[in-house]
Image (tube, rainbow, N blue to C red):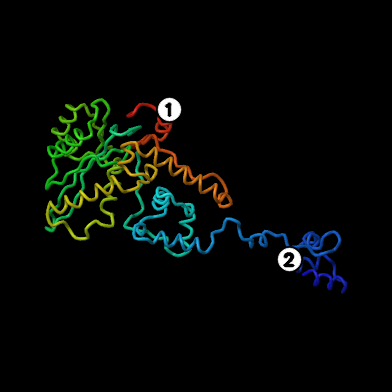
Amino acid sequence: MIDLIKESRLAGARLEKACDLLQISPRTLQRWQGEAGEVKVDGRKAAAAARIPANRLQETERRQILEVVNRPEFASKPPSQIVPLLADQGEYLASESTFYRELKKSKQLAHRGKARRPAHSRPLALVATGPNQVWSWDITYLASTVRGVFYYLYMIMDIFSRKIVGWEIYEEQTSELAAIVFRKAHLREGVRTENLVLHSDNGSPMKGATLLSTLEKLGVIPSFSRPSVSNDNPYSESLFKTCKYHPGFPENPFADLDQARKWVTYFTRWYNQEHCHSGIGFVTPDARHRGADHLILANRRAVYEAAKAATPERWAGRVRKWDRIEVVSLNPAKKAARSMESEGQRACGF
């Protein structure tokens, strides 16, 4: 372009007209030529973009990431689950965002299991700062081999740790059966009477006289969803979704109660002791319930700090924060929830 402009100038053309024809300004031509007339290196952003970043992954590292995410134990997990598990094993390959980027490049960034997009719920305010302060429970249907006949799964969870603290399957749903399930869970956990709040929706088993009488005797405060609001019990709904979209959930209906109970026994053990829950920092509910998550998260921080120290050029900023989630809210009012969490109020407020 510089040579063309020189030729046009020698032929009598004006500089402005020649530059306009090539869609550049005279000032751009000056920068290219420099003060002494020598041609400079193109300094435009487009040219700089062609440079290879220093922290770019090597091809061997990319292949290693793809090999890891396709292992049998990780095949149905997203990077948000894989990265913490690798950190627990003392292994760091790349950041979570890098895992997602490489999966996208290889066209593997689809749902890696039965999980669907989670539903967001509107929240009555309950706050838990430790286990056995707020429990949530509900009943879900399990299909049987007889059309129109179902088994009913009663399940109680602690919202702070997400641990399943009690469950049972019956052929009917009643307040009497709900009271039995709750009493067993209450005794098993050794709950102090002055702390516990039990949240549920407005179904007849939840508001039946037998269950309410049992709660009153045990000093447990009942809490219910708002009328006509289906998403005021989000933790239990999310738990049932995790159960029914688990890769091992039977494709066919349950033949009998024993088969259903056997499956839920397996699921409860997996969920409490193996499942890294995203809502509690990707630790297992059982570990958080026992307080063992402090050590796990501290170990992950150490692994990341060591990885940064070994290859500082790979890190543009701070390492991932593995902070413990100290406060869990159930259906908080937006402004009230923020103030309650910041002030660290008592375990349950409503």
Q: Which mark is residue 343?
A: 1
Q: Secondary structure at mark 2?
A: loop
Q: Earlier in the sequence, mark 2 or mark 1?
A: 2
- Residue identifier under label 2: 23
Nearer to the camera, 100 or 200? 100
Query: Gap between marks 2 and 1, in whole Å?
Result: 61 Å
Residue 211 in sight from this viewpoint: yes
Q: How crowded is the residue under tag 1: few (<14 C-alpha within 10 Å), some, or many (20+)?
A: few
Q: Quadrant of residue 208?
A: top left
Image location of residue 141, percent across then percent down: 19, 50
Q: Which mark is residue 142?
A: none
Q: Nearer the viewer, mark 2 or mark 1?
A: 1
Residue 207 vertical position relative to residue 27 in the rendered view, above or below:
above
Q: Secondary structure at mark 1?
A: helix
Q: Quadrant of residue 68?
A: bottom left
Nearer to the camera, 314 or 127? 314
Q: Amino acid at mark 2?
A: Gln
Tell me if label 2 and label 1 are in contact, CB under 8 Å: no
Image location of residue 35, percent across then percent down: 85, 59
Q: Residue at x 25, y 53 (%)?
A: 244
Q: Residue at x 28, y 41 (%)?
A: 163
Q: Is residue 276 left or right of residue 205?
A: right
Viewport quadrant of the C terminus: top left
Q: Is residue 23 left or right of residue 130?
A: right
Q: Amino acid at mark 1?
A: Glu
